[in-house]
Amino acid sequence: MVENNALLKLTHGMYVLTTNGAACFVDAVCQISSGDNPLVSIAVNKKNFTNEVLHNQDRYALSIVGEKDNMDLVKNFGFQSMRDHDKFASSPNKVEMIQGVPVVKDTLAYLVLEKVDTIENDTHTLFIGRVIEAKLTKQDRPMSYNYYQEHKDELMKVTTTQGKTAWVCTICGYVYYGETLPEGFTCPVCGVGPELFEKKQG
Ligand SMILES: Cc1cc2nc3c(=O)[nH]c(=O)nc-3n(C[C@H](O)[C@H](O)[C@H](O)COP(=O)(O)O)c2cc1C
């Protein structure tokens, strides 16, 4: 048996992944080699538009989000798709071209990467990139996925409509209104099942 709650204890950082024509919020980032040319892997869901675009791009960037950064970054880049919304135009932080790649500025730091390999897995593609530029902007604490989980309500200011029964996704904050969740329901934003929804009586 695989309990999703156990996997949620694997904590990561919080990042905005950007490339020409696409961007999404990610936490599944890992440094897999150091030295003069560090390598970083990013697991990107095959359903994300960013996955499709990244297959045709050589370069991309990661902006490292801190505990004090604007949480609208999560909503903007993590709760909607570039398929039907220009996230760069609505970004709460300035987006600037660096090494030919759009980079979300004013977070803790950014990395620009050059793609060296991809590995296809069941649900995600692992994009492996060499860091070609890295800049530290602020010395604040980076936000961990765990910190985000624990402070999500206050950070994301999840509010539900008075007088309505709501089901709030404990992972991303998506709100579904109704007395019960429909049969076979999964979160349209982050894909988790009904066991990770919390009932709130408005
Ligand atoms: C906190 C958080 C962490 C996320 N981590 C990942 C991740 O590691 N990999 C991934 O593919 N999607 C991740 N997502 C989901 C994507 O950001 C989301 O599906 C996004 O809307 C995809 O946009 P796109 O279709 O424009 O690519 C995360 C979302 C949030 C809110």
Image (spheres, grey):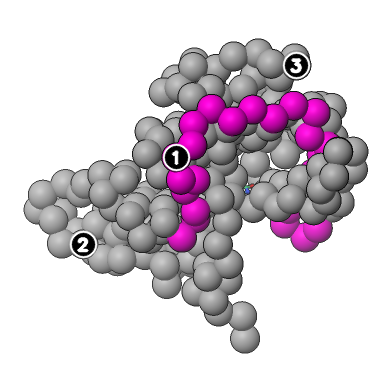
Amino acid type of the residue that numbered disc 2 sits on in the rendered structure: Lys
Q: Which mark is residue 140?
A: 1
Q: Quadrant of residue 199?
A: bottom left
Between discs 3 and 2, the one toward the N terminus: 3
Q: In x, y percent, where is residue 61? A: 68, 30
Residue at 74% in and 50% down:
31
What element does badge 2 sit on? strand
Q: Nearer the viewer, residue 116 or 85?
A: 116
Q: Report which residue position mark 3 lands on.
A: 99
Image quadrant of ligand 1 equals: top right
Q: For the N terminus, which image quadrant?
A: bottom right
Residue for badge 2: 200
Q: Residues within 10 Å of mark 2 (few under 14, many from 20)?
A: some
User: What amino acid does circle 1 point to?
Assistant: Asp
**Which residue is farthest left?**
163
Instruction: Tell me: residue 128, above or below residue 145.
Output: above
Residue at x 26% of width, y 44% of height = 157
- Give residue 179's position: percent from left, percent from top: 24, 64
Residue at mark 2: C-beta within 8 A of ligand 1: no
